[in-house]
């Protein structure tokens, strides 16, 4: 199964919760002709939101700590559970080690952005007029409706793993908000609270070829008759953050999928003329996508 659960990802309220993807006609044509979801490189996404994938200010507090006397009680208690403290009883050594780990995670969050590929959805049981306005031309927009259960079926033949989860929003300037650095996915599943109107659910592909390099390896073994055999394989080694930052970010990863399993419904924007709606119907029919197509009624006249 290509769509996989991961503990770092918060699932939708349930597998049938509606997930909307609003798009322009060219993007819809690309989807329906190519049968893949376009997943955009997070490093390139950061050109619009420079905080994408990075850590909040509270994760940098360690830079102000020169001695154990500067530590808040929560950090001091954590350091006392450190293996270094149990072996040496030296809290200052624990602090220096803690600061080194924090700095490494900061560098990794920045460098690893180019290894993540994102496809964004809007979590909502109903249409959003704001999303129509933001992500498509209002008179020529299209939205597809899906769900986590659809993702499970639609990506079943994909060789790569796709993860999915709800984005959380927080105040990145708050002293009380930190992101747990023990898992590299955590930093890409938060955004600043000013983006909370997006109600984003994101699909994520992690390209380990960016963060790791692979080297050939030979091992020698013996069969049941004591005949010597040479086995060929490869071993992975993590790249340094400096090496990763020298990797030119790829534009995208194209996640092949079955559109009839991905899409539950197709909506045409509320102010689209009838001829545009008919064109969308003909396109969908031509490419044998057999799902309901509806004209949004958000702009219908009220009863009087």
Image (tube, grey):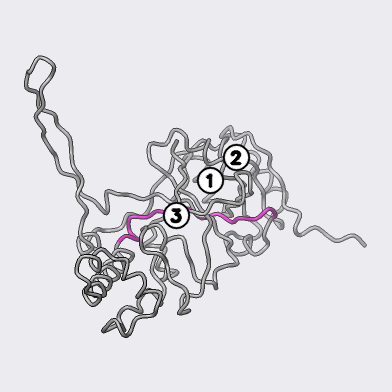
Q: Residue at x 63, y 41 (%)?
A: 264
Residue under numbered circle 3: 8
On screen, residue 44 versus residue 193, left or right, reads left
Can you tell which of label 3 and label 2 is closer to the viewer? Answer: 3
How far apart are the two marked residues, 3 and 2, measured between alpha carbons?
38 Å
Look at the image and give the residue range highlighted in magenta.
112-126
Q: Decide if residue 251 is on the left or right side of residue 33.
A: left
Please say if the residues under marks 1 and 2 sit with CB atoms less than 8 Å apart: yes
| Disc marking residue 212 | none
Dot placed on the residue nearer the N-terminal end, 3 or 2: 3
State the image coordinates of residue 53 (x, y, percent, origin top left).
40, 64
Residue, disc 2: 283
Q: Secondary structure at mark 3?
A: loop
Residue position for label 1: 29
Task: Work out whether residue 291 or residue 232 is closer to the camera in this orientation and state it.
Answer: 232
Could you say whether the residue bearing mark 1 is in a helix, strand or loop? helix
Neighbourhood count class around disc 3 (C-alpha, 10 Å): few under 14, some 14–19, many 20 upward:
some
As measured in the structure, the alpha-carbon distance from the residue carrying label 1 to the one carrying label 2 is: 8 Å
State the image coordinates of residue 159 (x, y, percent, origin top left): 38, 36
Q: 81 or 65, which lies in front?
A: 81
Return the disc, 1 or 2, that comes first in the chain's sequence: 1
299 is higher (above) or lower (below) than 287? below
């Amino acid at each position: 199964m290509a769509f996989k659960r991961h503990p770092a990802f918060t699932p939708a309220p349930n597998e049938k919760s509606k997930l909307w993807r609003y798009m322009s006609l060219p993007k819809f044509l690309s989807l329906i002709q190519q049968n893949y979801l376009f997943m955009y490189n997070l490093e390139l996404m950061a050109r619009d939101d420079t905080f994408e994938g990075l850590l909040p200010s509270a994760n940098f507090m360690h830079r102000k700590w020169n001695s154990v006397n500067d530590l808040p009680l929560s950090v001091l208690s954590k350091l006392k559970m450190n293996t270094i403290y149990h072996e040496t009883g030296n809290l200052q050594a624990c602090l220096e080690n803690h600061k080194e780990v924090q700095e490494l995670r900061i560098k990794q969050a920045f460098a690893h952005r180019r290894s993540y590929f994102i496809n964004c959805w809007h979590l909502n049981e109903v249409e959003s007029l704001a999303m129509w306005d933001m992500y498509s031309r209002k008179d020529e927009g299209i939205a597809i409706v899906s769900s986590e259960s659809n993702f499970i079926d639609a990506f079943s033949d994909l060789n790569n793993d796709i993860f999915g989860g709800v984005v959380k929003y927080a105040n990145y300037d708050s002293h009380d908000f930190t992101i747990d650095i023990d898992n590299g996915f955590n930093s890409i599943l938060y955004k600043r609270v000013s983006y909370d109107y997006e109600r984003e659910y994101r699909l994520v592909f992690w390209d380990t070829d960016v963060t790791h390099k692979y080297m050939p390896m030979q091992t020698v073994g013996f069969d049941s008759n004591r005949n010597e055999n040479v086995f060929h394989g490869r071993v992975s080694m993590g790249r340094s953050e400096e090496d990763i930052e020298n990797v030119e970010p790829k534009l995208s990863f194209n996640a092949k999928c079955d559109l009839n399993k991905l899409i539950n419904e197709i909506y045409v924007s509320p102010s689209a003329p009838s001829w545009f709606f008919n064109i969308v119907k003909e396109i969908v029919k031509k490419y044998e996508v057999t799902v309901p197509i509806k004209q949004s009624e958000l702009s219908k006249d009220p009863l009087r």
